[in-house]
Image: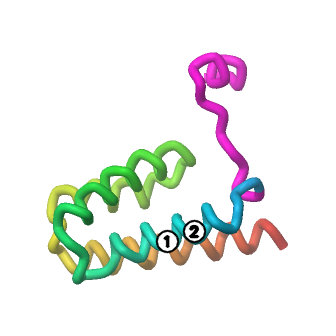
């Protein structure tokens, strides 16, 4: 899909650098709430679903796949830990390319 087609469809990706500090805090809170084993099951399912779509939208397919697994098995502690590791890897990657 070309940039023109995406813009016509109402989708214009925002670069990570354009994210505000408040947006970054909200994102961190969502990820933390999802990965916390004590999170409410309903909230975890909703957060996993949102994360899945967002991750696919930016090409973070491993995170999207992990979020799909959380939707299927929301109480699986191993999957929650894997999500935390994947997110750490993405953060490290972003930090490395921003240097």
The quarter of the picture where the N terminus appears is top right
**Residue 49 vertical placement versus 30 (above, below):** above
Q: How is the image coloured?
A: rainbow
Q: Where is residue 76, by image quadrant? A: bottom left
Give the x, y percent position of residue 13: 65, 40
Which residue is more in the foreground, 25 or 54? Answer: 25
Task: Please name whichever residue, 21 or 89, is drawn nearer the observer in this view of the structure.
Answer: 21
In the displayed structure, 53 sits above or below 83; it is above
Mark 1, residue position: 87
Circle on res. 1: none
Q: Is residue 81 left or right of residue 76?
A: right
Residue 70 shows in the view? no
Q: Are marks 2 and 1 in contact (CB under 8 Å)?
A: yes
Q: How many marks?
A: 2
Residue drawn at the location 52% of the way across and 65% of the way down: 27
Residue 3, placed above or below residue 69:
above
* Residue identified by numbered label 2: 90
| Left/right of residue 28 with respect to residue 74 in the rendered view | right
The secondary element bearing badge 2 is classed as helix
Q: Position of residue 33 (x, y in %)?
A: 36, 74
Residue at 62%, 24% in the rendered image: 6
x, y (%) of residue 8? 64, 17
Spot the residue most to the right: 99
Image quadrant where one finds the C terminus: bottom right
Start-end of magenta stretch: 1-17
Viewer-side residue, 13 vs 76: 13
Q: Secondary structure at mark 1?
A: helix
Question: How many residues crowd around disc 1 within 10 Å: few (fewer than 14), some, or many (20 or more)?
Answer: some
């Amino acid at each position: 899909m070309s940039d023109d087609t995406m813009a016509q469809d109402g989708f214009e990706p925002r670069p990570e650098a354009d994210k505000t500090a408040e947006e970054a805090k909200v994102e961190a809170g969502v990820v933390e709430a999802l990965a916390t084993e004590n999170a409410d099951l309903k909230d975890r399912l909703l957060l996993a679903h949102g994360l899945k779509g967002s991750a696919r939208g930016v090409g973070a397919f491993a995170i999207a796949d992990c979020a799909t697994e959380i939707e299927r098995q929301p109480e699986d502690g191993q999957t929650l830990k894997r999500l935390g590791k994947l997110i750490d890897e993405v953060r490290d990657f972003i930090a490395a390319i921003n240097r």
